[in-house]
Image (spheres, rainbow, N blue to C red):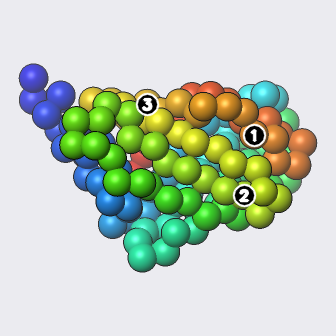
Amino acid sequence: MVFAVIALSVAGSVFAGGYSKPVVMTGVTQMADTAELLFDPAPADTGKLVVLGDHTNTPQQTYRFVYNVPAAAPNAVNPPVNIAFSDKQTLTILCDRLSDICRSTGYVTEGSATFSMSWKVLQR
């Protein structure tokens, strides 16, 4: 029960009206490299996608984006995070307030990397 309350308060504070602290989400590419979405804190609405190249031993790649976190309904289970990359590709990520797992509504390919549907929220 305590874990659920802590998870709810962390997830709720991360997605309520923007990010007051830097937020990191991790996922993987189709080649099993680690991908990180690094969200800058408010008032900035920018961030970057970093492909570490840790599985394929390729150089790290970085892609800039802008994001917004629309005001969610008070009881919304999956508040969205909308991301727009400089090449006009967009990605929407939905996060469950009761866990640190998120999912994309589709796939995005940046450079030669396509990104997973599942993301995990980490705070640094």
* Residue at 61% from the left image edge and 48% from the top image edge: 36
Crowding near the residue tagged with mark 3, few <14, some 14–19, many ≥20 C-alpha atoms within 10 Å: some
The amino acid type of the residue labelled 1 equals Val
- Mark 3 and mark 2: span between their CA atoms? 22 Å
The amino acid type of the residue labelled 2 equals Phe
The amino acid type of the residue labelled 3 equals Ile
Label 3 sits on residue: 101
Label 1 sits on residue: 108
Asked whether the residues under the numbered discs 3 and 2 touch, taking CB atoms below 8 Å apart as contact, a structural biologist would say no
Q: Residue 51: x, y in percent?
A: 73, 48
Please say if 20 is above or below 34. below
Q: Residue 95: x, y in percent?
A: 42, 36
Relative to 50, 72 lies left or right: left
Relative to 80, 75 lies left or right: left
Please say if 113 is above or below 18. above
Q: Identify the mark nearer the N-term, 3 or 2.
A: 2
Q: Residue 21: x, y in percent?
A: 36, 65
- Per the image, label 2 sits on a secondary structure element best described as strand
- Between disc 3 and disc 2, the foreground one is 2
Asked whether the residues under the numbered discs 2 and 1 touch, taking CB atoms below 8 Å apart as contact, a structural biologist would say yes
Q: Residue 109: x, y in percent?
A: 81, 41
Label 2 sits on residue: 85
Quadrant of the snapshot with the C terminus: bottom left
Q: Identify the mark nearer the N-term, 2 or 1.
A: 2
